[in-house]
Amino acid sequence: MLLRHDLMEMICSDEKDLIMEHYIRAVRLRLKFPGVSLPWIPPEKLWIPGCHVVAHAYAQVFGAKAVDGEHAYFKGREVSETGQTCIDLSTYAHSWNILEINDNLSLILDIYPDIGCPMMPVLLKNPHPAYWVPTDELFKRQIVKTLKESEQFPIEVRVVAEAFQKIGSVGS
């Protein structure tokens, strides 16, 4: 099952179709991508875009909102000499998409999960504790600046968006 049963009860048939369309498209993009070249990268080298480029390109082509924030992940755990378990969580700058399904439900579509995550896209209820967007405007600007500081970012997004359009819709 793609989503938990309680979430499936919150959506109608058309909304289920929309969710499946986005998820199948994301899987197709993962299977058929990478396959683009950039002018500043030698053709014999493989360029794999980051999650930031992928999320923003997906938003441009398929209309799902791109979100820039941080992703928390389980880095490890240790048991101290006193027997206490210490959980090591870490975060990194990350981008993902939001699917607005209805007034009561929006979903996170993470097409390009990073660092120890699955190869397949991730679909979760929004908000989710592992996906964090700062509320402090200064910190938010710092994250966005980190993600998009490269002059090539808009070019990379355009090139990936063009590739996404060529890969096509779910039915093709």
Image (cartoon, rainbow, N blue to C red):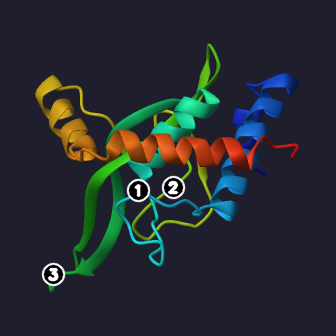
| Sequence-wise first label, 2 or 1 | 1
> In whole angstroms, how far apart are the C-alphas of marks 2 and 1?
8 Å
Q: Please report contact status of discs 2 and 1: CB closer than 8 Å, yes or no.
A: yes
Mark 2 crowdedness (10 Å alpha carbons): few <14, some 14-19, many ≥20: many
Compare residues 84 and 48 and report the one nearer the observer: 48
What residue did someone put label 1 on?
A: 50
Q: Is residue 157 left or right of residue 33?
A: left
Residue 172, image x, y percentages: 86, 46
Q: Are marks 3 and 2 in contact (CB under 8 Å)?
A: no
Q: How many marks do you count on the picture?
A: 3
- Direction from residue 164 to residue 79 in the image, left or right: left
Instruction: Name the residue at the top extreme.
Output: 103
Compare residues 153 and 85 and report the one nearer the observer: 153
- Residue drawn at the location 28% of the way across and 55% of the way down: 92
From the top left corner, tell me how far across and down residue 166 is, in percent: 70, 46
Amino acid type indicated by mark 2: Tyr
Q: Which residue is mark 3?
A: 82
Real-space Cα separation, disc 3 to disc 2, in angstroms: 39 Å
Label whose residue precedes the other's in the sequence (3 or 2): 3
Residue 3 visible in the current orientation: no
Up-down relation of residue 152 to residue 78 (above or below): above
What is the distance, in whole Å, between disc 3 and disc 1 at their CAs? Answer: 41 Å
Secondary structure category for the residue under label 2: loop
Point out the residue furthest to the bottom here.
Answer: 81
Residue at point 27% right, 67% down?
87
Q: Residues within 10 Å of mark 1 (few under 14, many from 20)?
A: some
Q: Give the percent coordinates (x, y) of residue 122.
A: 59, 52
Kindly state the secondary structure of the residue where label 1 is placed: loop
What is the x, y in percent for residue 89?
A: 27, 62
Residue 112's disc is 2
